């Protein structure tokens, strides 16, 4: 009987270790995904800012040109 309980305890410990390892793997994966999402968002923001700057420069140029014509 005592040996059976030891085997059950070892199995529980192994299961707990495997669960802990799985949780750590999930946390690492989530961190990586969040990091990539942040990088993607930053990239999109940079592209939007570039487009806004381009639009503003274009608008200012056109306004100056229009004023010079009038």
Image: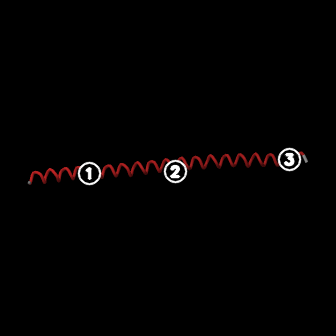
At x 14%, y 50%, the residue is 64
Q: Is residue 70 left or right of residue 20?
A: left
Give the camera-side residue of 63 and 7: 63
Nearer mark to the viewer, of 3 and 1: 1
**Residue that carries the numbered disc 2 in the rendered image:** 33
Q: Identify the mark nearer the N-term, 3 or 1.
A: 3
Say which mark, if any, is on residue 20.
none
Label 3 secondary element: helix
At x 77%, y 48%, the residue is 12
Say which mark, if any, is on residue 54.
1
Q: Is residue 10 left or right of residue 60?
A: right
Q: Identify the mark nearer the N-term, 2 or 1.
A: 2
Mark 2 is surrounded, within 10 Å at the Cα level, by few (under 14), some (14 to 19) or many (20 or more) other residues, namely few
**Cα distance between the residues tagged 3 and 1:** 73 Å
**Cα distance between the residues tagged 2 and 1:** 31 Å
Give the camera-side residue of 65 and 33: 65
Mark 1 is surrounded, within 10 Å at the Cα level, by few (under 14), some (14 to 19) or many (20 or more) other residues, namely few
At x 39%, y 50%, the residue is 43
**Residue that carries the numbered disc 3 in the rendered image:** 5
């Amino acid at each position: 009987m005592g040996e059976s309980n030891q085997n059950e305890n070892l199995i529980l410990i192994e299961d707990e270790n495997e669960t802990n390892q799985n949780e750590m793997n999930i946390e690492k994966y989530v961190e990586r995904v969040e990091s990539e999402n942040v990088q993607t968002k930053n990239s999109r923001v940079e592209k939007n800012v570039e487009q806004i700057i381009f639009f503003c420069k274009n608008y200012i140029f056109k306004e100056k040109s229009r004023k010079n014509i009038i």
